Image (cartoon, rainbow, N blue to C red):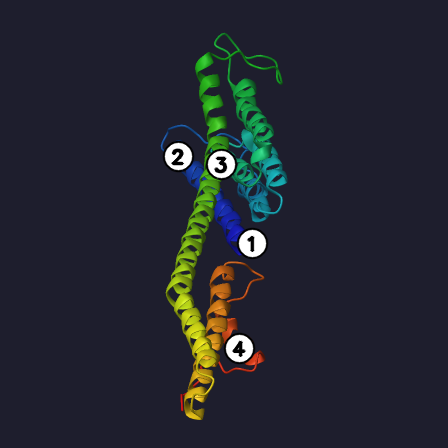
Amino acid sequence: MAADALLALASAIAVYAAASWERALWDLSGASGGVTAPPVPGGPGVGIPLVLAAFSVGVAVPLALRRRFPVSVALVSVAVALLGTGVPGWSGRLVAAVALCSATYHRPRQAPVLLLLSVASTLTPILFATPLPGGAWPPGFPARVSPTPLAQGVLIAVAPIAVGYALHLHRERAEQQVLLHQAQAARVVAEERAWIAREIHDAVGHHLTAIRMQANAARHVLPDAPPPAARALGTVADLSASALRDVRLLLTALRDEHRPTGVTLADVPARLARRGRPAHPQRRMT
């Protein structure tokens, strides 16, 4: 909102300054015997700064709300620009073009309506203000103009709509590229986790299973083994079974890390603690 308010203020100042500068140049030309400045609404030489300031503020202030009410802002700016068409040297239509461009950017589905509004606001001054080659028409009657000004007016009217829609498409493509990059990164991470899980299962899980089976088999084959040997075989079987359970828990964490409701690697120590075993058990054979 602050940036939009600054944009509105800068636009009003720029439009007013440009119109005042142009009228000052006309006054200098008139003083030196050149062309005098055309009158503005309100009478010649009466309230000229006030009229320029009113139109400049009226066409630019709505830009402060261009993000919340883009179409309404465009309508107000275009209406003020049309009302100020009779002010010589006033470039408020440029601000209206900015409002139309912003409205198309924020409301691309309203682009056809905004295009009609832009064409109508651009061609209206051409049709009603262009003098006839053979004389003037009655006030309010459209003038017959050559195709060149009409074509130029249409191109000028289409320009802000085209720019706004192109900027909107560019933003959409950028957002799609970000989403695609995130999806590809997630897929690569998932594939890497699956590969790690397979490697751990193949390299560690099978060996732990074999160690446990060998220890249990030795206990059954040697029922009369000395007590130290029996305790050693029991410790090996218990350690291998515990390590195998920890490996399976780690594999579950690796497979479910990319899921919001899955077990993460950070949860492994807590789950081990809940199961009554430390995260890093230290056991030794006796």
Query: Which residue is tagged 2?
Result: 31
What element does badge 4 sit on? helix
What element does badge 3 sit on? helix
Kindly identify the amino acid type of the residue bearing the numbered disc 4.
Answer: Leu
In the image, 181: left or right of 263? Answer: left
What element does badge 2 sit on? helix
Query: Which residue is tagged 1?
Result: 1
Separation (CA) of disc 4 from disc 2:
94 Å
Where residue 117 appears, as percent x and y from the top left, is 59, 28
Kindly identify the amino acid type of the residue bearing the numbered disc 3.
Answer: Gly
Query: Which residue is tagged 3?
Result: 164
In the image, 209: left or right of 53? Answer: left
Where residue 260 appears, as percent x and y from the top left, is 56, 60
Mark 4 crowdedness (10 Å alpha carbons): few <14, some 14-19, many ≥20: some
Say which of 124 and 179 sits in front. 179
The first of marks 3 and 2 along the sequence is 2
